[in-house]
């Protein structure tokens, strides 16, 4: 495969890896989102924001409408039987109208970031309007 056809995979710095580990093992009892972005020049994945006690609609409002993001969310889920769980989800948000080169950088780095996070629940969102509590609950199932 020639270099021109190879998809670049962005690096994940030690500070980001540390934050990912801390996020996975957090003890808070609310919904929290870790938003990650790609630095195109450095080809590196960076922390964009950490939103604690967030509602899905607030998360939707915080995301840029024309730039991809990775979202790792610890979602407080109240079950019908009274149980509370905190499923960890990886959401790949890539708007249709974002720059093609940026979409390729994000897509090329998605799997390596997912592996770094050790997350199996992975969902893709193309439009901000799709990212709702109902959508997430539907993806999580019963």
Image (cartoon, grey):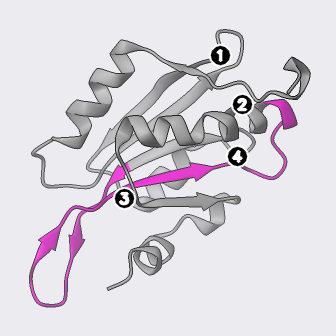
Q: Nearer the viewer, mark 3 or mark 1?
A: 1
Q: CA distance from mark 1 to mark 4?
A: 21 Å
117 on left or right of 136: left
| Residue that carries the numbered disc 4 in the rendered image | 65
Q: Nearer the viewer, mark 1 or mark 4?
A: 1
Q: Which residues are magenta?
A: 73-101
Would residue 128 be counted in the magenta stretch?
no
Disc 4 is placed on an element classified as loop
Q: CA distance from mark 3 to mark 1?
A: 30 Å
User: Which percent across, then down, holds residue 96?
Assistant: 81, 52
Q: CA distance from mark 4 to mark 3?
A: 18 Å
Residue visible at 85% across and 18% down in the picture = 3
| Residue that carries the numbered disc 1 in the rendered image | 43
User: Which percent across, then down, holds residue 118?
Assistant: 34, 44
Residue visible at 34% across and 15% down in the picture = 15
Disc 2 is placed on an element classified as helix
72 on left or right of 78: right
Disc 3 is placed on an element classified as loop
Q: CA distance from mark 2 to mark 4?
A: 17 Å
**For marks 3 and 1 on the same chain, the one whose residue lies earlier in the sequence:** 1
| Residue that carries the numbered disc 2 in the rendered image | 105
From the image, which quarter does the N terminus lie in? top right
Would residue 82 be counted in the magenta stretch?
yes
Q: Nearer the viewer, mark 3 or mark 2?
A: 2
Q: CA distance from mark 3 to mark 2?
A: 28 Å
Residue visible at 89% across and 22% down in the picture = 2
Assess disc 4: are there few (<14), some (14-19) or many (≥20) residues with their C-alpha within 10 Å of its C-alpha: some
| Residue that carries the numbered disc 3 in the rendered image | 55
From the image, which quarter does the C terminus lie in? bottom left
């Amino acid at each position: 495969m020639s270099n021109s056809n190879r998809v670049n995979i962005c690096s994940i710095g030690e500070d980001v890896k540390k934050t990912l580990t801390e996020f996975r093992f957090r003890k808070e009892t609310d919904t929290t989102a870790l938003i990650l972005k790609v630095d195109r020049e450095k080809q590196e994945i960076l922390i964009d924001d950490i939103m604690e006690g967030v509602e899905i609609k607030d998360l939707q409002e915080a995301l840029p409408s024309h730039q991809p993001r990775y979202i790792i969310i610890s979602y407080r889920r109240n079950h019908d039987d009274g149980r509370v769980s905190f499923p960890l989800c990886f959401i790949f948000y890539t708007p249709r109208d974002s720059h093609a080169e940026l979409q390729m950088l994000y897509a090329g780095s998605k799997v390596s970031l997912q592996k770094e996070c050790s997350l199996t629940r992975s969902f893709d969102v193309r439009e901000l309007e799709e990212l709702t509590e109902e959508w997430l609950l539907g993806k999580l199932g019963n």
